[in-house]
């Protein structure tokens, strides 16, 4: 079309390399093409290390440099970077060399995201959000913690997307005058979060077998991980029947391996001599770096590794493991008071509706 407006963004064969100490080169971004037409919205999604942070950061840098050449005054404002991981670490020297101030917020909660967008609206030329999936996950986890369970229902989904949840960010984003660049983690990391109740769980192959409700009373959950588990055939058959109890279960790291202890799996009724000790220690399967990270954290006072749930995912047994911090007595009292207050509010609302 002859009168078609030019693209808002046009990138061809973007490549970024970093020199290594051994004389080699690390390729952070390789041969990226990206064209965005007016009115289009593109999602930049990939696994950790895929290059999305670097690509998004360089788009922001090029945009500011272009606006400065056009003499647009707000281009002299800093670029804001809401960084839930380490993406900004690679970009700081690049922006410094270009003479573009970069303000970094190393946070990841939903409340922090809202605050960052509001700040950037007044003080920044461009906002980079990397990754947008962490605040969403934190919002879901805080809601599940409040409800004392490890999955979401259809009713939860409505609340989380509503005016008291994600819509707060959506409204800011839609009405913003900022240039906003958002990156997201690959969706497979979050496929145990239910969108529309049991149908979604069945569709994704996730079935909760057992939950550790006691953990939410005793601990604050700080981080969650998915682990495989080594089991015998009779134990798997017993788990499929739901004869599993996590009430007294806990985890420990020994010789670089993660173990779950005191997790009770009832003997399989047809197992006979093949049945094992119901509470034998069982090895959990996680990446070595994740185990090392957990091992270092539990050295700190008050921290523990706790199994939150066991579930079947595409027919395989998985364990949801969490890094937790023990609650003080006053924390438990406050939780009890909050529960009582919520019950009273719910009761009052029901009476009012009737």
Image (cartoon, rainbow, N blue to C red):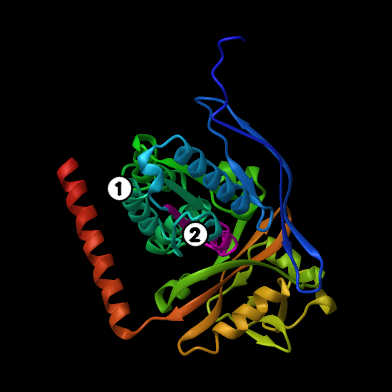
CA gap between label 1 and label 2 equals: 19 Å
- Residue 354 seen in render: no
Near-viewer residue (13 or 333): 13
The answer to which image quadrant residue 167 occupies is top left
Q: Percent x, y for residue 103?
A: 42, 59
Q: Is residue 219 magenta?
A: no
- Residue 308 seen in render: yes
- Residue 135 lies, with reference to residue 1, above or below; the image says below
Q: Residue at x 33, y 55 (%)?
A: 115
Residue lying at the far top of the rendered structure: 2
Q: Is residue 214 left or right of residue 30?
A: left
The residue beneath circle 1 is: 122
Q: Percent x, y for residue 203?
A: 64, 42
Q: Which residues are magenta?
A: 79-94
Asked whether disc 1 touches disc 2, contact meaning CB atoms under 8 Å apart, the reply is no
Q: Residue at x 35, y 57 (%)?
A: 111
Residue lying at the far left of the rendered structure: 352
Q: Percent x, y for residue 154?
A: 46, 43
Q: Residue at x 63, y 52 (%)?
A: 206
The residue beneath circle 2 is: 83
Q: Is residue 89 magenta?
A: yes
Q: Secondary structure at mark 2?
A: strand
């Amino acid at each position: 079309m002859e009168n078609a407006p030019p693209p808002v963004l046009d990138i061809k064969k973007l490549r970024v390399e970093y020199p290594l100490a051994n004389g080699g080169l690390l390729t952070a971004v390789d041969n990226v093409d990206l064209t965005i037409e007016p009115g289009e919205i593109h999602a930049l999604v990939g696994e950790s290390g895929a290059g999305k942070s670097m690509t998004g950061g360089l788009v922001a840098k090029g945009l500011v440099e272009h606006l400065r050449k056009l003499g647009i005054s707000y281009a002299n404002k800093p670029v804001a970077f809401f960084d839930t991981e380490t993406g900004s670490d690679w970009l700081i020297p690049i922006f410094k060399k270009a003479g573009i101030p970069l303000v970094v917020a190393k946070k990841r909660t939903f409340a922090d995201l809202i605050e960052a967008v509001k700040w950037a609206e007044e003080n920044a030329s461009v906002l980079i959000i990397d990754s947008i999936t962490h605040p969403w996950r934190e919002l879901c986890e805080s809601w599940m913690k409040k409800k004392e369970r490890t999955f979401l229902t259809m009713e939860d989904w409505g609340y989380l997307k509503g005016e008291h949840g994600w819509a707060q960010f959506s409204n800011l984003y839609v009405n913003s005058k900022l240039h906003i660049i958002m990156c997201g983690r690959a969706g497979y990391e979050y496929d145990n979060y239910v969108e529309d109740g049991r149908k979604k769980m069945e569709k994704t192959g996730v079935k909760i077998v057992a939950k550790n409700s006691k953990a939410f009373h005793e601990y604050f959950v700080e981080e969650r991980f998915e682990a495989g588990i080594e089991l015998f055939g009779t134990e798997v058959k017993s788990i499929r029947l739901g004869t599993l109890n996590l009430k007294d279960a806990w985890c420990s790291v020994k010789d670089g391996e993660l173990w779950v202890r005191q997790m009770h799996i009832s003997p399989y009724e047809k197992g006979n001599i093949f049945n094992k000790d119901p509470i034998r220690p069982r090895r959990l399967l996680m990446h070595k770096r994740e185990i090392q990270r957990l091992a270092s954290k539990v050295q700190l006072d008050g921290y523990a590794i706790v199994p939150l749930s066991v579930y079947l995912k595409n027919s395989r047994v998985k364990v949801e493991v969490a890094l937790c911090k023990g609650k003080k007595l006053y924390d438990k009292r406050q939780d009890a008071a909050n529960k009582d207050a919520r019950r009273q509010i719910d009761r009052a609302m029901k009476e009012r509706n009737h």
